[in-house]
Image (cartoon, grey):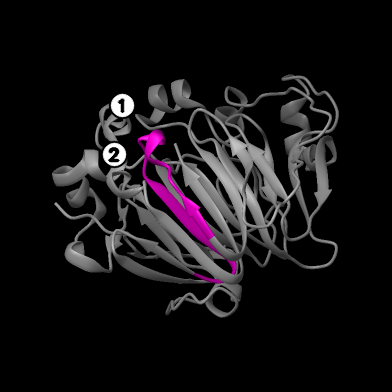
Amino acid sequence: MKFEPLTFNPVFKQTIWGGEKLKGEFNKNSPLSAVGESWEISCVSGNISVVKNGAFKGLPLTEVLSKYGAGILGRKIFASSGGTFPLLFKFIDARDDLSVQVHPGDALAKARHNSFGKTEMWYILSADKGAILYSGFREHITKTEYPELVRTGAITNALASQEVKEGDVFFIPAGRVHAIGAGIVLAEVQQTSDVTYRIFDYNRKGPDGKERQLHTEEALDAIDFTVEKNYKTEYSPRINEAVNIAKCDFFTVNLIELSGKVHRDLSRQDSFVVYMCARGSAVLFCAGTETKLKQGDTVLVPAAITHDITLSSEKAKLLEVYI
């Protein structure tokens, strides 16, 4: 089989907190209003990505993996993941605040939902002046204090808030309470899971006029109450180099600020590689093909052809993701 880079039709999610920036600034052609999320590559049940280019055009990702899983994922990942694409890639536009929430780890998610856990990372693409997010606790609270803080809405006072700007990075391990604030657009890399425990939602009502469901008790078993000194990832960007901004058991994320050409040989990883175009435009040369990327585009390079990747741009920012 001759592999080539794969692009996909995004799966759009209309949300009560979504906006219009993904459709405008990030080139998403969606008929929906208030698009909160664009799922770029997904193997979540009911939200399977469909290939939009090349020999696999029109096929769901699950079907491609069933035939060529080792070549797409890498041999070790194919064996350990059961043939499931292990990561979910998103762009998120928060016109309004998202709920305060937490995600379970692998063990709890498996026991309760027969699912992977949900560790994720955020790369801020844009932020309105004064926009904030919550990540982790700023002060120690106990399990017995937690329910009352949720009931009164004071839970946000116990969380660490951070004013953000383009280029900021936050690693959100399973168990860390968090919330994306209004005015933020970000790229998210996460495990393949859609399990979220909503802790507090500002007494907001859904489309049915009722307050949205909370998972206060379920969340208690998932929350890590540890207080950290700093929740933002510090890094120093460098032109035409892959700078690591997140690394864990589930994924590695590098930032590449392009101004010219960069050659990448990632064959030793035995993993697929995904590029998300955060700013500008670029061209990916691989396996004799040329893939053009503009801001908001995502491409998957199968593991079988990661030995010879060239990225070219006058000016662009790319997220490079592999396992």
Read off the magenta span.
Answer: 262-282
Q: Residue 253 occupies which quadrant of the picture?
A: top right
* Majority SS type along the magenta span: strand
Q: Is residue 58 visible?
A: no
19 magenta-colored: no
Q: Where does label 1 land, which residue?
A: 80
User: Residue drawn 18% across and 45% down?
Assistant: 68
- Residue at 76%, 41% (x, y): give it: 232
Amino acid type, callout 1 = Ser
Front disc: 1 or 2: 1
Q: Residues within 10 Å of mark 1 (few under 14, many from 20)?
A: few
The answer to whether residue 143 is seen in the rendering is yes
Could you tell me residue 11's position as x and y percent?
39, 63
Q: Alpha-carbon distance for marks 1 and 2?
A: 9 Å
Q: Secondary structure at mark 1?
A: helix
Q: Quick check: 36 left or right of 71? A: right
Q: Is residue 254 above or below residue 177?
A: below
Label at residue 84: 2
- Give the side of residue 199 with respect to residue 37, left or right: right
Three-letter amino acid code at the position of disc 2: Thr
Residue 104 in the image: x percent, y percent?
Answer: 52, 30
- Magenta stretch encompasses residue 264: yes
Q: Nearer the viewer, residue 180 or 149?
A: 180
